[in-house]
Image (tube, rainbow, N blue to C red):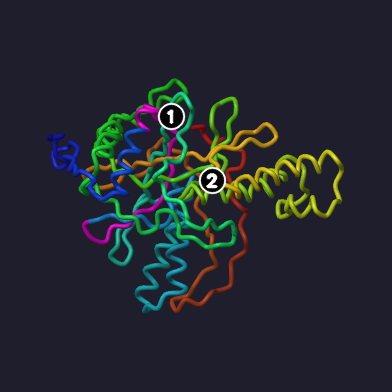
Amino acid sequence: MSHGHEGLGGARPLVVRLPVEPVEAVAEADAVDAVLRAGGFAVRGPVFGVAAQDGPRWRVVGAVAAADPQEARDSLNSLFWSRAKNDPMDRTERRALLEAVALLERERVGELTVLGTRYRVIRVEEYAGAGPEGIELPRPSDPEPAVPDWDSRTTKPQTDDGLVLDPDAPITPAQAAERLALRELVYSGARFPDDVREDSRRARDAHPDVVLMPATFTVVERNSAGWQPAGIPHPSAHDARRALARSLLRFEPYRHGLLEDVRADARATLAAGNCDARTATALAAYVAGADRLRAAPVNELEVLGRVYRIARTRRMVRWGPEGPEGPRPSDPAGNEPFAIHVPLDEDGNMLPSPSPSPSPSSGAGTETPPL
């Protein structure tokens, strides 16, 4: 079945293969069941990252989780700076990296080429399956660790680092159906401003194809507007549960005035016995919630009237003749570019820092769109 050809302005034809390996076949069956249960999508909006092209393929550099394009540029700035400081190279190579750092400190660049590699800030649409039961939960075939690790200090690989974005790779029937459905996705609701809707329509025409990225798992909290993200995306449902358990012991009690320091721990504070009865009762509820997460794989949890869920979040990147889509004019701009690292010389040595400039706004107070 032909859907046009990208070189002529249309989308690529899809190459569909049947899953034959048992684990993949089970995942395919889960995907079909998920469509029958949910049948629709809840769109959160864009997240941003960086992709690099040093051959025919594009690969992701770091996690695609930035709230705005400037945050993604800052991550690229840090990547170049770290390479210039720590990697063995000659002065010419280091100079090229430092020139890129200087450019990113003063301009909102969409892409640049450094040492033969083309880097681009990419825009990724985040969404989730949705139906009568709300936002989709993890699927039975989603990977779970044989021995759950609850130590929050454990280092884990970034969600997307090194991921190859290949629009020509063979895909399963369920993936093909999803890609075809998402090709026509545009913002159309009245809650979207006119420029956002117009940019969305232009993007559909300029980037007619869609590439699916691996599922992520996000802690969401239910409120009057729906399900609000309460954390960053994680590569597995267990990683999201571990983050929720930590949040229940630290951030949530702090956010609601039960702990004086975000670094304090509800369990330790309760054991010390130096709080009043009302606070102790509330802290005990948070500790019990964290313990329920540890006792078994729980995907929905209620603590003190607040309902948390592990949502199976999905992502797609639009694709056109020149590769993955970059930021749109109507996307949030983020902070102004600024110097985020001390300067280096051509040998990788740190130089005295200039007088500090006022810190840019962190974006606090900006509401995250609900799923």
The amino acid type found where label 2 is placed reads: Pro
Where are the magenta residues, as a range?
A: 34-56
Rendered location of residue 85, percent (x, y): 47, 73
Nearer-N-terminus badge (2/1): 1
Q: Could you tell me which residue is drawn at 56 percent across and 37 percent down? A: 300
Mark 2 secondary-structure assignment: loop
**Residue designated by label 2:** 297
Rendered location of residue 224, percent (x, y): 59, 25
The amino acid type found where label 1 is placed reads: Ala
| Of the pair 126 and 363, the residue shown nearer to us | 126
Q: CA distance from mark 2 to mark 1?
A: 21 Å
Q: Residues within 10 Å of mark 2 (few under 14, many from 20)?
A: few
Disc number for residue 16: none
Q: Could you tell me which residue is drawn at 42 percent across and 22 percent down? A: 189
| Of the pair 191 and 113, the residue shown nearer to us | 191
Question: In the figure, 66 relative to 85: above or below?
Answer: above
